[in-house]
Amino acid sequence: MPMQRQCKIVQNSRLNPYAVSMVLEVGEMVPGTGQFLHIKCGDGQLLRRPISICDWQEGLLRIVFEVRGEGTAWLAERRRGEYLDVLGPLGHGFETNAKGRYLLVGGGIGIPPLLGCARNASGNCTAVLGFRSGDRAMLLGEFASCCASVRVASDDGSMGVRGFVDQVAREILETDRDFTAVLACGPRPMLKSVAQLAREFGVPCKVSMEERMGCGVGACLVCACDMADGTRKHVCKDGPVFDAEEVDWDA
Amino acid sequence: MPEVDLRVSLAGVELKNPVVAASGTFGFGREYGQFYDLGELGGICVKGLTATRREGNPAPRIAETPMGILNSVGLQNPGVDAFIAEELPFLRQFDTRVIANISGNTPEEYGEMCEKLSAAGVDLIEVNISCPNVKAGGLAYGTRPELAAEVTGEAKRHAGKVPVMVKLSPNVTDITEIARAAADAGADALSLINTLRGMRIDVDTRRPILKMNTGGLSGPAVLPVAVRMVWEVHTAVPHLPILGMGGVSGGEDAAQLMLAGASAVAVGTALFADPYAPLKVRDGLRDIAARQGLDKVRSLTGAVRPW
């Protein structure tokens, strides 16, 4: 059940010049992987900001976000001991089981929610993490500590393989397609490529989508996502995680 | 502080308090029902219904603006029949008034929906003649007095005993013209304001944020427009009760609309920042009434002292 809660910040650190990691005391909130929090970012911003949940452990929840605008800039400046007005946990997340073997494919700020999946199926996952450039890399050590293997790609070749994550994912699937599912989070073009790839290799695929959001709980219907059957679902309530086969990738 | 009677009447329908959840911001109540008992509300205006299911407009459908938001949802809803079968029974579990908001492509569609909803048993029908986000019908009915009258008349003929409230658009030169037309055609109440048409452009991509280019503006930015229009309409048709809305996020905002002439108020956009906003508005109104020594909140209605 979602709730509104004032959550104390117990840690705020920079992962790189763009990304912030924050740990919150969330009390009785028990999130699933791939869900998100809807956070009030000061009085100047009318709308809350949806921030994906990176990890959770007994009352402590970690979020990782990039500073993209005024709201996230405000959020990044909050210090340890301050409180945030949080709505959550929200949305339909990734369903992983501890014995599953997952191919995790993350791009940029889509990477953090996959860490929870990696930890849930500890030791069984292969992670393919992509960044625009090496200075945007994050969470590599943490993925390495709970994944069977971690591969890195960067658009400019400054870290790992030069190129996109779907190329690396293809190489992996060509030799080993015995995955429970591909779980992907990142920019829409990346998700589209990964969805095609998973279909080609016959592996189930779940994708975490993004859209401009209003209420965050499924009431205002603004965060529409076009489905393959012609209907429009909503990222905040039906998603953010959808079956890749459900999504209309050509919309 | 003395006990304040919060009950108000809207077209003969008694609300336990003057605060209603605004159409399009509250779904069919299920989501916010996770946070509090929906029976705390004076009423719930449900998501705008159409004769058949609609998927609405492509995303992005929302843009944040200074103290406001633009939306272009485009009346996504499951259709009036699915509402009656699947959502109305849920809403009926709560001790609150259910207001069905409807939009038609033709006057006949409004009539058909009124007939179904009246038979199904809703407390009030809000006839939307002011949606800025649909091509046919919608706003066109709300900007021309003769069309507003035609739709109102058709709704009244088919609504049976259920009172009909006509929702007015602010996107007109003189809102009192439309208000009078609806009043003359038999409207039992008026609700205002719907959203103001607006636009926001990303200067780097030179693209509008909304996929539909334009959308409807709501939020605190529109409150003064709403107060002015409620006052004008109340002055023009003082016998018709008004459900006032537009940018209400606190008790003082609601009190302004009531002083301007509203019998009750709706809270919408404020929900997105705070799911409990309607309850805070209700408590704020009670505090204002108590501070002013009023024994009933309804004595605020129309009590503005204009210069």
Image: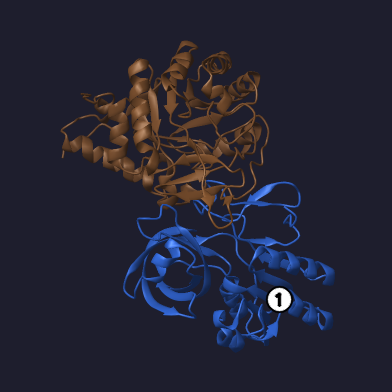
Chain colours: A blue, B brown
Number of numbered discs:
1
In the foreground, A1 or A227: A227
Q: In the image, is B32 to the left or to the right of A186?
A: left
Name the residue beneath numbered marker 1.
A164
What residue lies at 76% left-to-right and 49% top-to-bottom?
Answer: A229
The C terminus of chain B lies in quadrant: top left
- What is the quadrant of residue A190 in the picture? bottom right
Q: Is residue B263 visible?
A: no
Residue B293: x and y, percent? 15, 33
The N terminus of chain B lies in quadrant: top left
| Above or below, comparing residue A16 to residue B153 in the picture | below
Q: Is residue A122 visible?
A: yes
10 Å crowding of disc 1: few (<14), some (14-19), many (20+): many
In the foreground, B74 or A207: B74
Residue B280: x and y, percent? 32, 45
Q: In the image, is A180 to the left or to the right of A74?
A: right
Q: Secondary structure at mark 1?
A: loop
Residue B208: x and y, percent? 57, 48
Residue B251: x and y, percent? 29, 40
Q: In the image, is B243 to the left or to the right of A230?
A: left
Amino acid type of the residue tagged 1 in the rendering: Phe
Q: Looking at this view, name the residue that lies furthest to the top.
A: B184
- What is the quadrant of residue A58 in the picture? bottom left
Label 1 marks which chain's residue?
Answer: A
| Above or below, comparing residue A146 to residue A46 in the picture | below
What residue lies at 70% left-to-right and 82% top-to-bottom?
Answer: A162
| Above or below, comparing residue B48 to residue A119 in the picture | above
What residue lies at 43% left-to-right and 61% top-to-bottom?
Answer: A71
